[in-house]
Image (tube, rainbow, N blue to C red):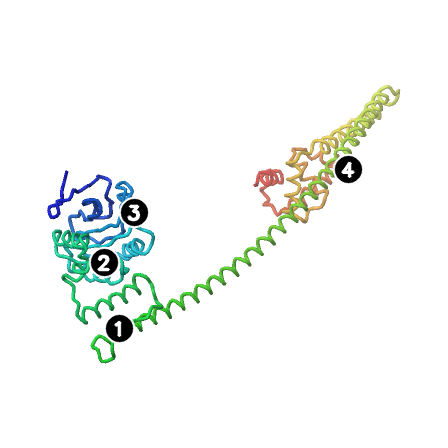
Amino acid sequence: MKTCPTSGLPVTAKPHWKSEHPGYTKHLELIGNDILHAYVEATQPVTLDTMSNEVVKTIIKESGLQDTMLYSIWDMKNVVDISYNYKQGINDLIYHQGPRFVAVVFFNIEPACRIILETFAAIVPNDMTVLLREDYGDAIRTITDFKSGKGEEARHTGQGTNSDSILKNEFLAAVARISWLNMLNQQIPLPPAESPYYPYFKAIAHLQEDLKAREALQEKDLQHLKGDSEQRLTQKIILLNAQVELNRKEQQQFAQEKAALKSRISAQEMELTRISTAVGEKSAALHLLCDQIKGLDIEQHSKHRMIEQCQGMLETELTEKRLKTELTTGDSEFLSKLQKRHPNLNQRELRVGLMVKLNYDTREIARSIGISTRGMESIRYRMHKKLKLDKHKSIKTYLSELAEER
């Protein structure tokens, strides 16, 4: 088993006691049964980005150290900066319900990172000590002194105890409480006005007041935005409710129109049945009349004319029957489209347009509407002008194109 070269204590390390980060890997191992050793594996200087509290919890759980007073040594080799996010992780570890560390010792400290660690040391609770040492051996010996009851001696070894060191510590603590913990209502301890450090502490106090004022402005802006958002939301809800009510009314109107159309269709079906029956009766009567005329002993020319008139009346009745009983939904939609596109067309012209579209010839259309073939030609001429068609375009072609439009 691996042992600590300074203390001779056993060292426990497991493959999963680590966390991967961009550009580096953070490893943790257990020295003895209460010292956590953390170090960074990297090929170049790195910035610590996220504190691996979960790995620490895993080690404590797997090693059964939930109720143990812990110590930690931190190898800072290759670490040149600590992110704000990592500082928040430190706050969570020492001020929330995390493992209790009696002492944390940093060693192999890069010059660029030293002031950050000194700031950290300035804000930890009174029951926790943070110290800075030169190397691994110094760090282990410092922890050993703490464990043997020489905590105060270890605390002051390598640390200044004069007034300048105390003021430096208070200054760093004030900065950390503002920047790390966002404590803007703390009392800044000012040295005497004649002290050369007074301007620095006063600047910190002014900074604190400025940050409080900025926070108040941000809160005011936030409340304004919140109020504006709530007002807009209320307006949107009102509009939405109004739209819902409008849709409800439109649905009711649609239901009423649908019921009315069903009633109208039912009535039209009854009317078509009546018409079909009447046409059938008329046709039967005309057939009987034709047969009777054929049996008359009269001049042949007159008989032939009378029979032709009967046949013409039969054809007109059949045309009328087809037009009234075979009208499809598409035909109805076509008539609606034609009337909307050309509101200047009268009812007879609309009927002519439908029959032209249904491929009835001029003679059939003329008989259906009760006019002569010449009169039908006049109607077609007027329709051609009303439809504003080019002289080379027929009504039939135009109406077929209109029917196919979507």
Q: Which of marks 3 and 2 is nearer the N terminus?
A: 3
Q: Please state which of the two labelled residues, at mark 2 or mark 4, is closer to the viewer.
A: 2
Q: Which of marks 3 and 4 is nearer the N terminus?
A: 3
Left or right of 164, for residue 252:
right
Q: Please state which of the two labelled residues, at mark 1 or mark 2, is closer to the viewer.
A: 2
Circle 1 is placed at which residue position?
201
* Above or below 284: residue 350: below
The Cα atoms of the two marked residues, 3 and 1, are separated by 40 Å
The residue lying toward the viewer, choosing from 334 and 140, is 140
Q: Please state which of the two labelled residues, at mark 1 or mark 4, is closer to the viewer.
A: 1
Q: Which of marks 3 and 1 is nearer the N terminus?
A: 3
Viewer can see residue 205: yes
Circle 4 is placed at which residue position?
370
| Secondary structure under the numbered disc 4 in the rendered image | loop
Q: How crowded is mark 4: few (under 14 residues within 10 Å), some or many (20 or more)?
A: few
Q: Residues within 10 Å of mark 1 (few under 14, many from 20)?
A: many
Mark 1 is on which residue type? Phe
The answer to which quarter of the image holds residue 318 is top right
Viewer can see residue 77: no
Residue 153 point in image, percent of width and height: 16, 60
Residue 171 point in image, percent of width and height: 24, 68
Circle 2 is placed at which residue position?
129
The residue lying toward the viewer, choosing from 111 and 160, is 160
| Secondary structure under the numbered disc 3 in the rendered image | loop
Circle 3 is placed at which residue position?
67
Residue at the outermost bottom position: 194
Residue 156 point in image, percent of width and height: 17, 62
The Cα atoms of the two marked residues, 1 and 2, are separated by 24 Å
Left or right of 350, for residue 155:
left
The Cα atoms of the two marked residues, 2 and 4, are separated by 115 Å
* Above or below 299: residue 8: below
